[in-house]
Amino acid sequence: MRFENLNKMKGRAMMFLTLTMILACVNQKSMKKPKSEKTTMTVGFKVTNRGLLLSREDRGDEKTMSLLSDGTYRNTFVVYPVKNQIDSWEPIEQKALGQQPDEITFFDFEGFDLFLDSLKLLDVFNPYNEKYRPFFHFTPTSGWMNDPNGLVYYDGGYHLFYQYYPDSTVWGPMHWGHAISTDLVHWEQMPVSLYPDSLGWIFSGSAVVDINNTSGLGTIENPPMVALYTYHNRPLEDTGCDTFQYQGLAYSIDKGRTWMKYEHNPVLRNPRIRDFRDPKIIWYEELKRWIMILAVQDHISIYSSSNLMNWTFESNFGEGTGAHGGVWECPDLFPMQAGDTTKWVMLVSINPGGPNGGSATQYFVGDFDGHTFTREGTKTKWVDYGKDNYAGVTWSNVPKGDGRRLAIGWMNNWQYADKIPTGKWRGAMTVARELELVEIYNDYLLVSRPVVELQTLRGKEELLKPGIVSGEMEIKKVFTLPLEINLHFDTKNSSAMTFAERFGIILSNENNEKLQIGYDNLNKLFFIDRTGAGWDSPAKDFAGIHYAPYINNEPVLDMHLLIDRASVELFAKGGLVVMTEQFFPTKPFTSISLFSERGEVSLTEGVIWPMESIWNDIK
């Protein structure tokens, strides 16, 4: 933990605020440094400044920081001060400190001169203006983040919970981090919702609004939000026992702001199976019952319940079907309309075994009767062919008036997730996406598009001049990310000898690093080439050319690109083909070119929008 209120250890609900919000206020001139031994330091507060910034050493010793108000000690927090090197910076959140303190006193800090000397005012610190920090993708202020969890809409707010470890930038004891949005674009950081306890770490799960109060944990007038999640008991795992994962329940009666764990956890015990996790809960109206789908090794187990607490096994799905290159994780199940037909879609993430290596999410289309899921077809289908979209799930309780199936994924890959060079935070989410099911090519396929709300971030559009692209043609010499780009290419004569074998767009910088995104007309593949885009992982599994198959027989080929500081999301052919990839150049990309290889292609339409930051409220 970063800062821990020792007087409120049981709840610990205020801890995350100390990491994520911008606080009240320190006057640096009021710092009273003791003599050379620097065993203590007292910092006085004034309301005219924004706050105090502490340096942190990730593997540092624990020390105590005490708050005084009107001469009385109010709270004591644990900090991890710098002794040898500064690994990151942590803002102290005034709201989390309780009553406005007059002073902060650091006791017994002998040997921590670097920490005491590096104390700063918060006024000039912006955690969302760091190298590689996304402008319009959600990231935690600091620490490690992976799978999205508990996606649920309630009373005007889209809740995003996520796997979170606040004490490091690599995976560790999992918590549920929390953020809320009113528009799926701008996010408010919230306190950590679920902490590890004696039953284990808090792994992935889901959340629902129990509208009819079937659980009895709320009332009809104030229905509870209920979360089902996996407990991961690390000490039990270390004994070699297989029963170290089981399902727990927590609930909220204040619209998701605070959570209480069910006193009789776990609600579903482990039947002696390793990898028994990631419950996704849905309400099945025809049977008036809750359905839980659970990732169990290499398949999905389906359970049902009338009250979210007592669960009955129904069936299994997946053994011998679909991709099985790794363990199955983070499932989802929901109905979708394809024209006049209702089909059920099941998402299943797999690691490893993705189409371009490492992590990815496959999907199945079929029928569900409340007991059994039956798949149609045998072809393996992927939500996203890029290297960096994993564990995606959808929001529950989206209003019928909206009607969209909304999803978000973790923008990373387990091959290199704990090594990407992002500093004091690791892990970002994709943009929120709308899913659609279409019947095309004698099959049912998922279409993904960025939510329309993202268009509110667009700046003034810049139209590109149509014309022939031959070789590499610079269209914008100087730009600043992020950008949204729409391109349309004429492909009526794609079988002609003079038509380009490959074509698309290149981002580059003054260090001759480049990111190439395009279509291989010879081999009928979309591709993203990040071999020259800067950073590669120590295992050399980051840089590479990654592909998505698509035979284009139409007269127009479109590419819709969302390009943030260190990521690109490609939505091609109206969202039938999706690729999400990160990149980490040594210097920002500042030049854009169109390209064609071994032939020509015609650009018929193109537009570029600069994109605003979703964190503009943090100056």
Image (cartoon, helix red, strand yellow):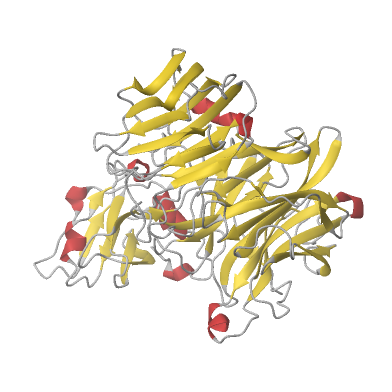
Is 363 rendered above or below residue 176? above
**In the orientation shown, which residue stands out farthest toward the left?**
36
Q: How many numbered dots are placed on residues in this image?
A: 0
Where in the figure is residue 393, as x and y percent of width and height?
Answer: 64, 50
Q: In which quarter of the image is residue 303?
A: bottom right
Residue nearest the observer in this picture, 445 or 458: 445
Q: Can the viewer see residue 98 in this picture?
A: no
Q: Is residue 279 left or right of residue 613?
A: right
Is 305 rendered above or below residue 134? below
Where in the figure is residue 149, as x and y percent of width and height?
Answer: 61, 55
**In the orientation shown, which residue stands out farthest toward the right?**
287
Is 98 rendered above or below residue 123? below
Q: Can the viewer see residue 350 in this picture?
A: yes
Residue nearest the observer in this picture, 83 or 545: 545
At a point 37% along the width and 66% down the height, the residue shown is 77
Where in the figure is residue 488, as x and y percent of width and height?
Answer: 54, 21
Residue nearest the observer in this picture, 207 or 511: 511
**In the orientation shown, which residue stands out farthest toward the front?**
497
Image quadrant holding the C terminus, namely top left
Where in the figure is residue 8, as x and y percent of width and height?
Answer: 48, 68
Q: Quadrant of residue 418?
A: bottom left
Image quadrant holding the N terminus, namely bottom left
Q: Is residue 14 left or right of residue 212?
A: left
Is 403 rendered above or below residue 382? above
